[in-house]
């Protein structure tokens, strides 16, 4: 987690990357829709949102799994208010506890994107009341830590970040968040260890490297911090080049 507000806003938590390979992660990608690609631009979010509305209104009976898919699709096109409403309906009507918990976790993520952190906290707590040791619990805990920190409850945030890595020690995002909160508490050495764990588990990006560099600076390891900072800058430049190339391919 970075210390810059605009970068934190881009951060998405509902990824579940710490679970086994066969576990199907949360996804914000829309479900398959029966659209003729020759008539509709598949990246036209206005068309997608109209289809979602029709699907929602045309339903004669409550299908919690379908509501969850629609809620995630709303998130995929940045319609977070509609997502929170749809995901709450999914959670309320779901008979399956796993589905219910997944809906509450994603409802929390949608509230967080709206900066409604009190509502996000409530949603994550609902998810954890269902099961605090399930496959979704680590995601709920690390998301809850982030929401509490944004809401000003910084002491509680670290506790939940610790709980997330206890539930799933292979969850890279949880280690990253733990490192951030430790660094905010002045525990730079422990923070470096947490960031190294996140990197070892596959989370090698500019943000985690920048936070590790900041922690090394706090320890007085200036030369090593500069090296890590340069690595972060290289990753940012590489990402920018890839965006430019992708944009060029689309225009061609």
Image (spheres, helix red, strand yellow):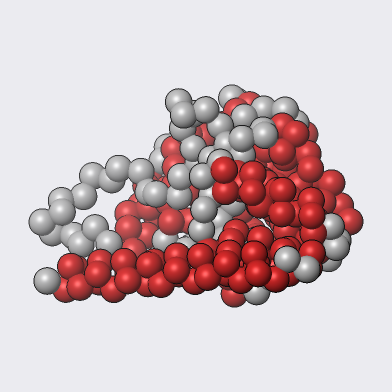
Q: Residue 176: x, y in percent?
A: 66, 52
Q: Residue 94: x, y in percent?
A: 58, 31
The answer to whether 201 is drawn above or below residue 229 in the figure is above
The answer to whether residue 115 is seen in the rendering is: no
Q: Nearer the viewer, residue 40 or 216?
A: 216
User: Residue at 84% across / 57% down in the picture?
Assistant: 187
User: Residue at 53% across / 49% down in the picture?
Assistant: 203
The answer to whether 102 is drawn above or below residue 57 in the figure is above
User: Residue at 76% across / 47% down in the picture?
Assistant: 161
Q: Residue 79: x, y in percent?
A: 48, 62
Residue 122 in the figure: left or right of residue 94: right
- Quadrant including the C terminus: bottom left
Residue that sits furthest to the right in the current view: 155
Q: Residue 21: x, y in percent?
A: 46, 29
- Quadrant including the N terminus: bottom right
The answer to whether residue 40 is seen in the rendering is: yes
The answer to whether 20 is drawn above or below residue 162 in the figure is above
Disc tally is: 0
Residue that sits furthest to the front in the current view: 223
Residue 112 in the figure: left or right of residue 162: left
Q: Nearer the viewer, residue 177 or 58?
A: 177
Residue 61 in the figure: left or right of residue 174: left
User: Residue at 68% across / 42% down in the picture?
Assistant: 140
Q: Nearer the viewer, residue 218 or 221?
A: 221
Location of residue 19 (image quadrant): top right
């Amino acid at each position: 987690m970075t210390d810059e507000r605009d970068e934190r806003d881009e951060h998405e938590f509902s990824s579940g990357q710490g679970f086994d390979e066969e576990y199907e992660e949360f996804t914000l990608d829309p479900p398959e829709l029966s659209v003729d690609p020759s008539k509709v631009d598949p990246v036209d979010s206005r068309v997608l949102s109209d289809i979602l509305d029709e699907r929602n209104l045309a339903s004669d009976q409550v299908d919690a799994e379908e509501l969850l898919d629609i809620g995630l699709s709303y998130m995929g096109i940045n319609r977070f208010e509609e997502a929170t409403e749809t995901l709450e309906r999914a959670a309320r009507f779901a008979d399956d506890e796993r589905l219910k918990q997944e809906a509450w976790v994603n409802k929390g993520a949608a509230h967080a994107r709206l900066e409604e952190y009190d509502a996000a906290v409530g949603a994550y707590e609902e998810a954890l009341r269902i099961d605090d040791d399930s496959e979704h619990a680590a995601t709920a805990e690390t998301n809850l830590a982030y929401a509490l920190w944004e809401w000003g409850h910084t002491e509680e945030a670290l506790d939940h970040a610790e709980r997330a890595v206890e539930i799933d020690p292979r969850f890279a995002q949880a280690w990253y968040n733990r490192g951030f909160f430790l660094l905010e508490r002045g525990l730079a050495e422990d923070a470096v260890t947490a960031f190294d764990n996140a990197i070892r588990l596959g989370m090698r990006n500019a943000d985690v490297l920048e936070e590790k560099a900041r922690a090394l600076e706090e320890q007085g390891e200036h030369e090593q911090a500069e090296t890590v900072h340069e690595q972060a800058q290289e990753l940012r430049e590489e990402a920018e080049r890839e965006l430019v190339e992708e944009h060029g391919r689309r225009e061609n």
